Image (cartoon, rainbow, N blue to C red):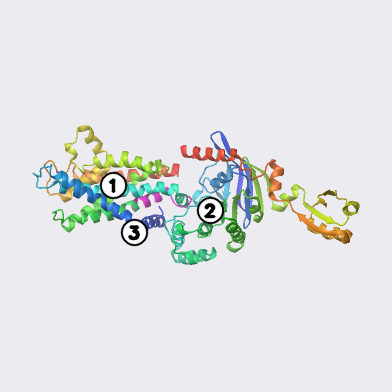
């Protein structure tokens, strides 16, 4: 069943179209990733789904509720971790969570237990009575995830959850997020502009200039780029090349004393190749396409090129919203 | 309205108020300076023919000042909440905008009334002899006035995005509201144009109501300027109006 349904969503800010005819569905209990560079329209889409922004046209539903017309129902069904911290730094971790529990009308007899549970879940129970201003960036993020989970949301939104975190906290947070759907019966909708982070997703939509340009599982998307590349170093590259070309009909090329070829499923090709030219092989390595390659192929640019135009769009949207 | 939400918004503000001792001290220090330094200085200039010294005369006004500053300060914290992102957490919750505004206004009311009550406790030093009924009446007036001023502060806060605007609000709204409230001099002695300004200032009515309760005279230059019933009506009506305007502004701007 689709828990999120978006149909022909459009959002314009004056002359700029931040979201341009976007449609997608998200299955319950999965991790769905919205991947794209700065200013691509990810946060605008999230804001519409979270009922903070009204779309110019199109429809969005969460758990069957219309995001424009039934905002109260939608809000009850979702938890959100925003790009910027939204904790009260002058309160303790626990007080922040209690505040949230009251806002979401969690039953009083369950509140204490629930707050303790989510604190343990994000491994912050021992710090529960510390003021949030003493927390590191990673701890704050974990606390925000915990807060987003308190009211048993059906969808948890994570907008660039690892922004500004050091590599280790980032890895820890992703491991933790990957476990969320199963442990908590929740669907995750996340945005990121880090390609490698999108690998935890069950499905990914790649968005650029407000449009979805590709959608599928990480593997499907990578296959679209052309599959795996196998590099082999042998004692006699020329004869190995001939043999492989003859037996497997691959296009084999040679570069820097290695021969390499592209094939659909590298894992199963390697044993077959080794079986035929085994005695000549010195080393084998397999290179899988990354989502970065996917993005490069689709847009002709790498996602890390934080285009100044993307930041310009962000500034424009922010200024526009302040004025209106 | 969601009472859980209102409760927790008030509880948060109260907790922070208790924790920040320095805020309480400076909030109490300001009225004390006005009362005992400005008041003591000016009382040499002002004849006390009504049997009330100038320091005594400004006592209701100083209670009003305490309310004005702490109510506006409490409401302006909304700008801080916006700046530091916490407002977003409140705005995406399944809570009506009206509950958020009422919660914030009640936060300002409680914090301001506590501070005003502390200043009120000085009445014996100032030579007043207040009955329990008078004390309760003054505290009630303080609470209602605080609610109205806090709601007004929320309306202000919805128009400003960053805390740089804080000094603008202080200099161009709060200080004129204080000087044109009958706190330091009777409204009836002001030039006509300033009298009109004072009459559109909700604080004037709160301070005037306190003058009715604290002073025993109803005539003379230092007497209250407005009938008590009108004071009460204005405070209550402005409270409702400001809460509704703030609720609307929140709905639109977030």
SS class of the residue under badge 2?
strand
In this rendering, do the residues under marks 2 and 3 share a single chain? no
Q: Residue B204's spot in the image, x, y percent?
A: 23, 43
Quarter residue B165 falls in:
top left
Q: Describe residue A53's horizontal placement relative to residue B52 as left or right.
A: right
Q: Which residues are magenta?
A: B91-106
In this rendering, do the residues under marks 1 and 3 share a single chain? yes
Q: Does residue A136 sit above or below A53 in this rendering?
A: below
- Which sits in the foreground, A62 or B91? B91
Checking the image for residue A81, the label placed there is: 2
SS class of the residue under badge 1?
helix
Q: CA distance from mark 1 to mark 3?
A: 19 Å
- Which sits in the foreground, A73 or B22? B22
Q: Report which residue position mark 1 lands on.
A: B68
Q: CA distance from mark 2 to mark 3?
A: 29 Å
Q: Report which residue position mark 3 lands on.
A: B18
In this rendering, do the residues under marks 2 and 1 share a single chain? no
């Amino acid at each position: 069943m689709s828990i999120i349904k978006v149909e022909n969503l459009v959002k314009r800010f004056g002359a700029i179209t931040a979201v341009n005819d976007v449609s997608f569905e998200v299955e319950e209990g999965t991790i769905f990733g919205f991947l794209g560079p700065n200013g691509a329209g990810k946060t605008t889409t999230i804001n519409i789904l979270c009922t903070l922004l009204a779309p110019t046209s199109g429809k969005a539903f969460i758990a069957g509720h219309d995001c424009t017309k039934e905002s109260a129902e939608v809000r009850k069904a979702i938890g959100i971790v925003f790009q910027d911290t939204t904790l009260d730094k002058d309160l303790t971790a626990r007080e922040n969570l209690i505040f949230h529990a009251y806002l979401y009308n969690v039953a009083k007899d369950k509140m204490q237990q629930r707050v303790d549970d989510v604190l343990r879940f994000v491994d912050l129970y021992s710090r529960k009575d510390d003021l949030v201003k003493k927390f590191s960036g990673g701890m704050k993020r974990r606390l925000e995830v915990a807060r987003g989970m308190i009211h048993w949301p059906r969808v948890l939104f994570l907008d660039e959850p690892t922004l500004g975190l050091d590599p280790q906290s980032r890895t820890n947070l992703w491991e933790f997020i990957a476990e969320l759907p199963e442990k908590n019966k929740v669907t995750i909708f996340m945005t990121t502009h880090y390609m490698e982070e999108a690998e935890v997703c069950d499905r990914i939509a790649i968005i650029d200039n407000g449009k979805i340009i590709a959608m599928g599982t990480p593997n499907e998307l990578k296959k679209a780029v052309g599959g795996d590349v196998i590099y082999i170093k042998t004692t006699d590259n020329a004869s190995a090349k001939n043999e492989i070309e003859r037996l497997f009909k691959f296009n084999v090329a040679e570069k820097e004393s290695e021969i390499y070829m592209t094939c659909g499923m590298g894992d199963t090709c390697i044993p077959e190749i080794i079986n035929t030219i085994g005695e000549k092989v010195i080393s084998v390595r397999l290179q899988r396409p990354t989502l970065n390659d996917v993005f490069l192929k689709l847009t002709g640019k790498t996602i890390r090129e934080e285009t100044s135009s993307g930041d310009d769009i962000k500034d424009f949207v922010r200024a526009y919203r302040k004025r209106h | 309205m969601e009472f859980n939400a209102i409760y927790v918004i008030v509880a948060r503000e109260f907790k922070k108020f208790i924790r920040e001792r320095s805020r309480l001290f400076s909030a109490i220090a300001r009225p004390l300076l006005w009362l005992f330094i400005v008041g003591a200085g000016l009382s040499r200039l002002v004849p006390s023919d009504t049997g009330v010294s100038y320091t005594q005369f400004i006592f209701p006004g100083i209670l009003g000042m305490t309310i004005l500053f702490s109510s506006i300060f409490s409401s302006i914290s909304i700008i801080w909440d916006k700046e530091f992102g916490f407002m977003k957490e409140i705005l995406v919750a399944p809570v009506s905008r009206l509950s958020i505004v009422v919660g914030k206004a009640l936060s300002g009311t409680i914090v301001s009334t506590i501070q005003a009550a502390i200043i009120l406790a000085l009445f014996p030093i100032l030579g007043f002899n207040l009955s329990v009924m008078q004390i309760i009446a003054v505290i009630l007036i303080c609470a209602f006035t605080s609610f109205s001023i806090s709601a007004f502060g929320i309306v202000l806060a919805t128009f400003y995005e960053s805390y740089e605007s804080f000094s603008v609000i202080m200099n161009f709204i709060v200080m004129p509201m204080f000087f044109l409230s009958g706190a330091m001099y009777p409204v009836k002695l002001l030039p006509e144009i300033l009298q009109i300004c004072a009459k559109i200032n909700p604080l004037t009515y709160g301070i005037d109501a306190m003058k009715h309760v604290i002073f025993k005279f109803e005539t003379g230059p230092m007497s209250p300027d407005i009938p008590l019933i009108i004071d009460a009506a204005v405070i209550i009506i402005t409270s409702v109006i400001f809460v509704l305007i703030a609720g609307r502004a929140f709905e639109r701007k977030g």
